Amino acid sequence: MIMAAGLGGCQLKDPKYQLYYVEGEQLYNKHCSNCHQKNGTGLGRVYPPLANADYLDLHFDEIGCLIKYGRRGEILVNGEHFNQPMPGVPLLTELEIAEIMTYVGNTWGHEKGLVDVRSVAGKLETCISE
Ligand code: HEC
């Protein structure tokens, strides 16, 4: 289903953005919503929110690595501490990661615009050795 939320403003007419966003929403619902919930609110003290999350805004460049390889250790999101390992989804392609980032980066209060597959590819090279 196409949500009006992330499709507003001047990006309305960009077909690439719309495609990434719609595909990204489906991928999010498949790979992420179990924990972060369909509406991005997270779950209690266990799974941090993506909705209006300051962490997502401040560390957006690192989210590609996080999606692919996961994360562990304490993390501060909107003033709340979380500390629960997040498993990565290594099978996702660079395109799929760009689509997921376009979705989460333009929903629930975020306005990052289109995340291009080439920028994801460049970022992933910086995290590959971990
Ligand atoms: C098994 C549950 C689980 C799944 C599935 C999962 N996450 Fe997470 N995610 C977590 C946990 C737990 C943390 C906190 C990690 C820590 O404590 O270091 C986290 C942290 C994050 C963060 C940084 C903190 C924040 O709230 O901004 C982002 C962004 C994120 N996840 C996005 C995603 C995306 C996108 C997907 C799908 C590709 C995904 N996660 C799948 C559990 C999950």
Image (cartoon, grey):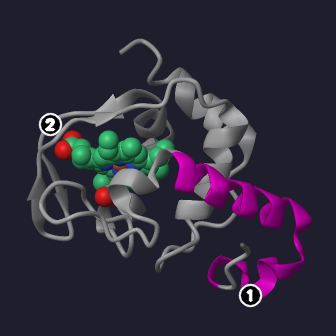
Of mark 2 and mark 1, the one earlier in the sequence is 1
The N terminus: image quadrant:
bottom right
What are the residue bounds of the magenta stretch?
5-30
Q: How far apart are the two marked residues, 2 and 1, measured between alpha carbons?
A: 37 Å
Left or right of residue 118, residue 91 in this image: left
Tell me which residue sits at (61%, 62%) in the image.
103
Q: Amino acid at mark 2?
A: Gly
> At numbered mark 1, what does the secondary structure look like: helix, strand or loop?
helix
Q: Residues within 10 Å of mark 2 (few under 14, many from 20)?
A: few
Q: Where residue 43 sits: x, y (%)?
A: 23, 63
Q: Where residue 33 sits: x, y (%)?
A: 44, 56
Q: Where residue 124 sits: x, y (%)?
A: 54, 28
Check whether the beta carbons of the residues at disc 2 and disc 1 lie within 8 A of each other: no
The residue carrying mark 1 is 9
User: Do we see residue 65 in this rendering?
Assistant: yes
Is 12 magenta? The answer is yes
The residue carrying mark 2 is 73
Query: Relative to residue 64, is residue 81 depicted above or below?
Result: below
Quadrant in the picture for residue 97: top right
